[in-house]
Image (spheres, coloured by chain):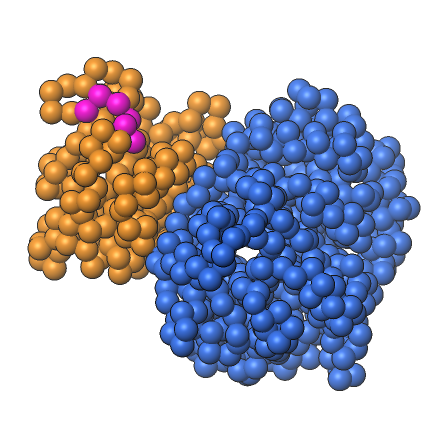
Chain colours: A blue, B orange
Amino acid sequence: MRNCAPKVAFSFPPIVNELGQRAMVSQNRNVQYFIKPTFLVPVVHAQAATALRDIGCSVFWDDGNAEGLLFDQWLDRLCEEKPDIVVLESTTPVMKFFWRLTETLKGRLPNAILCITGYHSMRMPGETFENSLVDVVVTSPHVDFVIQRMLGAIIGRDRELWMQSFAEVGGLVIRDGAAVMSTGHFSLVEDVDRSAIIDRDLTRWKLYSGENGNFLMPPGAYATSVIRDCSFGKCTFCRYNGADLTYSQMDVKKSVDEYELLITKYGVKEIFDDSGVWFRGKDAREFANEIISRGLHKKGCYFGFNTRFEYLDRETIFLLAKANFRFVLLGFEAADQETLTRLKKGYSNEHVEQCLRWMTEAGLHPHLTVMVGYYWQTQEQLDLTVRTVKRYMFQGLARTLQVTICTPLDFTEYHKECIREGVLLTEDYDDHDMSKLIVKTPIPHERYYEAIREMYGVAFHPRYLLRCVAFLLKFRPRDWQFLFVYGVRAARRVRQHMYNLTEAKSGS
Amino acid sequence: MQAVVRLNQRVADASFLLRIELERPVEWRVGQHFSIGLAGLGVNREYSCLDSDGDSQTFDFLYKVVEGGVLTPQLSLLTDGDEVEVWGPFGEFLQTETWLGANRRLAIATGTGISPFLSEAARKTRPHAASTQMSVLYGLRSGVDYFDGDGILGRVDGLTVCYSRQQAPRGSFGGRVTDFLRRKPHFAKEFDAVALCGNRKMIAETFSILREQGFPENQIESEVFF
């Protein structure tokens, strides 16, 4: 039988809960449901789509969730496209949804090969085969490389030989009749320099360019990550951690080429790199100098990244600010050293304030990602975190924050620890959606919800607002934009967070 | 936690050996690393341990002074009694079933990436590890970078040093470790497991070569140095 180039759909179905909120799933996120969600471009999948297009496949970028489609609209559209392969991205809180979905898809698209990716199924492929009609589980974080090899193995071959051909590709678990077969371990190290830079038109960049707290002035874009997965990779609650993972890094010039394209062709006003932890030291300075040498720091576009405390020194921070970096996201998981040590954060709280001070002096906008609800967290530890966060915000050392409940997910070290210690209160994956605490704790759960409300309440506190006004006297455009443009969006986002994490739960 | 410097001396052209004593003993396994920073600097970096002769309070680290670097130029100025900040240990390198279960092991290192393998070579002398074999492929720019941990490398079952920027002395190889593997396509097949430690370019390229040579990827592990 003749075979033309396979058609591959990268599908992100609408997932809506009983409150009418949509799940934010893509880009390895900890799922949360919002009425006005932030949809992130799933970076590695977008790279995969680009790479497949480049080798001659027909690609259908199918983010029905970000498009705001209803489930049936999305399903009908996908079926009309008649893809040969459907690639899905999953994580713990939506596993059951995806398992059910495979039954629906097999009913409507019986000949399509269903391929699931994501850290949960990657670490527990057998469970997914038992509970779904999926054909292939990708057991590698290098989805782009593995799917490219999968397609490389079947292009030009008869359709009925495709599943058999996948056996040649490492990093898969495949259904083989009634049996399930592993094709061997995935390649731990891939040369990210050889990965594709995302084609923004193919992957419909505008879907992801507006509603995002990381963008001061839309439209914004997420860069093709320079680091896969994380250069530190030890934090116990994080997916980018484990003996089966490592990190790889992209060349500075290749990444800056993409920044230049995003600015000149797409008119992007903020670029964020969602690498687990972005460059540090010499690489960070080289990146900033490359931006400056090309004049991209004067094009009205801000830049941002994730980092960790004790990774960037003062000189590098000031150079990044000169290159028009603005948004710096830092994990501030707790203010007590015991928790940081248990989470294997690898830094001292003693240096947090100094780092924030350097960033603020340089004009950056540090954003703290705070977590509460560790199974060991005492009232004293919680109070210390709340007090410290408020102080940083009132002193202007941090500009924005987000607070989430530390939820065990995707069989991370913390997840396995919770199972081992017998502190998980549920075995239902649906309950891992970060809307409530699901571990036993030394104090009532309500105390953590109160702490979340108190920290988010800072956004409306006169001392914080006064501090924002005081920043205007620095006469930096970003500070004016922050208060008068971003402020409205930020207030809405804070209300959503407070509602989701505290009130929706009590109303359900 | 705090630690006190007990030794900090140049052992190769740009490499120093740092010995520190922690304020309290910690549980530690071969292959793990620590984050080390200077008191008050607010910046730390990760360094793999060398063997500490079973002592869980005193640890040795090999580091290269990076010109223009944030930490290592200052680290090189430390003397006995100075304080450093230490976090860890972290990591699972050389602790996987793949490595521990292999009888014939190949360690491939460049520069200070030799550290965990010096540790492993010392472990090999212990009774439970006596039946295993480990060979080392050690990449350096030149002889002045060579460090063998006071002869520890002499205990391994096979040692090949690759010199990329000088004429190779007799018994060594002229070129990078990746050149060596390309030149000898059957070399790695003699081993059950391969562990890599060094800079990311070497690791990515070596992975690619081993893959092309048909070495099972699930028998390879790596620790990337920046």
The answer to whether A92 appears left or right of A35 in the picture is: left
Residue B52 or residue B110, whichever sits in front: B110
The answer to whether A58 appears left or right of A501 in the picture is: left
In this rendering, the answer to whether A326 lies above or below B177 is below
In this rendering, the answer to whether A263 lies above or below A127 is above
Where's residue A401, x and y in %?
72, 55
Where's residue A191, x and y in %?
45, 39
Residue A7 or residue A453, whichever sits in front: A7
Where's residue A360, x and y in %?
71, 40
Residue A288 or residue A459, whichever sits in front: A288
The residue lying at 57 percent from left, 60 percent from top is A85
The residue lying at 38 percent from left, 74 percent from top is A179
The residue lying at 41 percent from left, 73 percent from top is A177
Residue A490 in sight from this viewpoint:
yes
Residue A416 in sight from this viewpoint:
no
Q: How many marks?
A: 0
The answer to whether A354 appears left or right of A180 in the picture is: right
Query: Quarter holding the C terminus of chain A?
Result: bottom right
In this rendering, the answer to whether A263 lies above or below B31 is above
The answer to whether A310 appears left or right of A15 in the picture is: left
State the residue lying farthest toward the top.
B167
The residue lying at 50 percent from left, 35 percent from top is A193
State the residue lying farthest toward the right.
A484
Where's residue A167, x and y in %?
38, 58
Let me know if residue A18 is in the magenta part.
no
Name which quarter of the figure residue B109 lies in: top left
Q: Which residues are magenta?
A: B173-179
Name which quarter of the figure residue A125 lies in: bottom left
